[in-house]
Image (cartoon, rainbow, N blue to C red):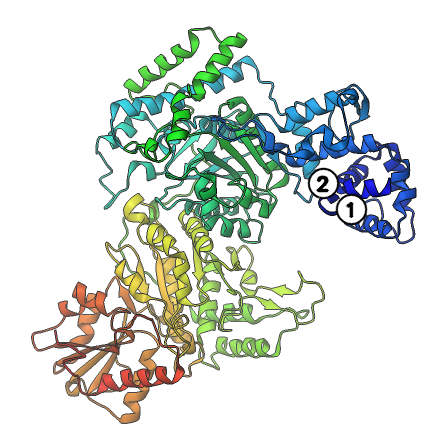
Amino acid sequence: MMRQFMGNSYLFGSNAPFIEELYESYLDNPASVPDQWRDYFDALQNMPGAVTRDVAHAPVIASFAQMAKQNKLATSAVGIADKRQIGVLQMINAYRFLGNRWAQIDPLKRQERPQIAELEPSFYGFTEADLSQQFNTGSFHFPNGQQATLREILESARETYCGTVATEYMYLSDIGQKRWIQSKLEPNRSRPNFSVEQRKRILERMTAAETLEKYLHTRYVGQKRFSLEGGESAIVAMDTIINHAGTAGVQEIVIGMAHRGRLNVLVNTLGKQPAMLFSEFEGKHAADLSAGDVKYHMGFSSDVSTPGGPVHLTLAFNPSHLEIVNPVVEGSVYARQQRRSEAEKLCALPVLIHGDAAVAGQGVNQEMLNFSQTRGFGTGGTIHIVINNQIGFTTSDPRDLRSSIYCTDVFKMVEAPIFHVNGDDPEAVALVCQIAVEFRQTFKKDVVIDIICYRKLGHNEQDEPMVTQPLMYKKVNAHPGSRKLYADRLVGLGVCRADEPDQMITEYRAALDRGELLYNPVLSGYTRKFAQDWSPFLKKEYTDECDTSVPQAELRRLAQRLTDVPSGITLHSRVAKIIEDRRAMGEGKLPVDWGMGENLAYASLVAEGFGVRLSGQDAGRGTFFHRHAVLHDQNREVWDAGIYVPAQHIQENQAPFTVIDSVLSENAVLAFEYGFATAEPNHLVVWEGQFGDFANGAQVVIDQFISSGEAKWGRLSGITMLLPHGYEGQGPEHSSARLERYMQLCAENNWQVCVPSTPSQIFHLLRRQMVRKLRKPLIVMTPKSLLRHKDAVSTLDELSEGRFRTVIGEVDPLDPKAVTRVVLCSGKIYYELLAERRAKGIQNTAVVRIEQLYPFPNEAFAEELGKYPNAQEVVWCQEEPRNQGAWYWIVSRQHLARSLGKSHHLYLVSRPASASPAVGYYAKHQVQQKAVIEGAFGELNQDVAPSR
């Protein structure tokens, strides 16, 4: 008997979850387990060294394994256990784990039911004769107590876990969450009990979804709209979530989705007037957008009524890059939650609508999920909806779609429960959406609704899916439609009259003919308490002046607050020296270095009411040990204690200062910060790359959102990117921030690209980003070696009386009339050029810094060049190779040439053109750097430095 028990028991190997579940049931309610097991667990609690009743179950599992090794189980639990009762509990557990594999969730019924022995009663030794026997049901919910026949148990388990709802949740480590889900599914067998009015509402939403698509298909033949046909239940899902969330206290919902079904969501969920949509189909567009975008990328917002009160809906603007909008939405929601000072994060809800191929295929989702429960990024849980049409573009062969069973398996990394549901059963869709809202509000965790449906048409309306999917589309073409199936069902149940479903279609089409909505929940004239006013930032020019200076007395006060470390904090000796030096800088005894200038900028902003949010890998300390915005107690004994952030203690009632050491991700983190910045104009939002070129991991965000969001969608953003840049011999990946890529994207005053070279410059630049009523992205090439360069320092006077200078002229007292050559440069190379000229005593060459490359400061540059009437040679000197850096952009736009006279000749001194940003050999780097520096003052060869 022991050999049989060891072979079949859930105590060992793959069967371990059974004993875990059984023990968890015992902890939850000792009466819920069979008597023999309850006695055994009671005895186990009293063993020497046993764990107490309220601790985790893992030690008891280990105890079972140890006892098995000592052959003690044969005479304890197993010896007295009823093998058939154990089999019943094992079978219930198997359905909770594996029942989803037998569920009827595919409307097309394309796949055969897999063979899963654990779901068959015979696996546990049961026969037909056992079906009428009574057994204890353990923790399974039965209306008549904990006793039922095997037939009733089997039918209930299959109805609950193998119907049109397939739930995955047994991997959750929190027993309370598992019990909660079971309480929502098992008593009603995963079937809702909606009223007549609720069912008619569901039919009306299905009718609205289908009718809109068919109307557009016939009115605008051949135009792309990425139809929702086949997935109309998604509109039911959104309707249920919004109304249920409103009842649960949600006041704002931000939605992110790609193009599939987007027009339907715009009209039938957010209440966009059909007449507006028709105008877009007919080619009309907003006159205030320089570029605009296609109709299925556009965003929208509205206030709608729900049973719990008004809810503000926002559909985020989205490019064609699938899934990239998801972290943008999370950042936007986080900003809205912070605006409310909402610790519980229950009032603002992110809802993300995915495609099945994209949710599994796009790595940005993994990055986003990775930070979803971390400080500074968690939004209290997201509701994910997958419109699973079982085809990715033209691929539906499961051997090519993915490597996991379900497209949603990635969500298991954050222990999100997953509800797979048949799209042909809109009532089941509504049920799981209600459960999802309640789960999120209760546990503040992500939850997933996977609507298994199909795609009626091709990838777009010009596509012919039969070419690549003939078998699948034979089934699709034979399908009567989800609305028709549900309508027929309601008529058969007597919920609707026979003519009522068709009457709904007629009424909806008539409203569309008028360009109106038959059902419009939008509240007109409603004013939200937490609405953000962007009007002060509209129609502003980058040339607008602003005062970024801070009185010296205030600077001294801020410096004192930044260096006042509580007595209980013991700093590392190196950090203590930095803080000591900063205290002297605030007193005017030492010049201000880069780290102090940056921290003073942040401190002054929060003191003036502007929030600051800084994130990036090692952002608190700074990659190059310069920032130290977070101080760590070297004597702390608890991992989450002993941390002090000086900028959070500047004064009472200051604006928030947040610094986050982000997860090791660029793409999703930068997208999150962009989303935050688009929702919060009064926050300086800063993302720092560990090295500048690491930003290329987020190129989609830079291209599709940051550089072009205003031109396409009119979305303002003041996000700031700090990108360490400079050639110091660290190799191809740690030298260049790829300045040329940002310069190539410059147009229409879309953003600012700056290369500050002193602490006062970064101080004024960061302050200008907030003080000036202009919200444009700011790209900053920040230094590395300059952080501690003896000449890269500033005085307090430069902070208290200065401003950001777009052009910095010659600093040495040269005779302007004697200058025959002007060398132009940006960044670190300036100090090397200055040192070279001074070392060689050169008097005929002025060195000028261009600190703002875009928008190019034409007037300031012309004024500086005009100081040297006899200068004929104008040299652009850069560290980067000739085909990189700012050179090509400058000459192609003719910014320099615009200010040059007939006697001026423009030359380039740089590294030779290169496929790599920098060489990997330090000796070769030194040779190249020396050649560039010497070349700026040497003979200008026509072959390597062409004239204008």
At a point 25% along the width and 26% down the height, the residue shown is 220
Query: Does dot 1 land on a helix, a strand or a loop?
Result: loop
Q: Would residue 590 be visible to someone looking at this image?
A: yes
Question: Going 51% across and 60% down the picture, which residue do you hit?
Answer: 664
Q: Quadrant of residue 516?
A: top left
Looking at the picture, does residue 19 appear above or below residue 717? above
The one nearer the camera, 128 or 338, is 128
Residue type for callout 1 = His
Q: Is residue 625 left or right of residue 69?
A: left
Say which residue label 2 marks.
175
Identify whether 341 is placed above or below 559: above
**Residue 280 in the image: x percent, y percent?**
26, 32
Q: Which amino acid, mark 2?
A: Ile
Numbered mark located on residue 57 in the image: 1
At label 1, counting other C-alpha atoms closer than 10 Å, the crowd grade (few under 14, some 14-19, many 20 or more) is some
Asked if the residue under mark 1 is in contact with the one under mark 2, i.e. CB atoms within 8 Å, the reply is yes
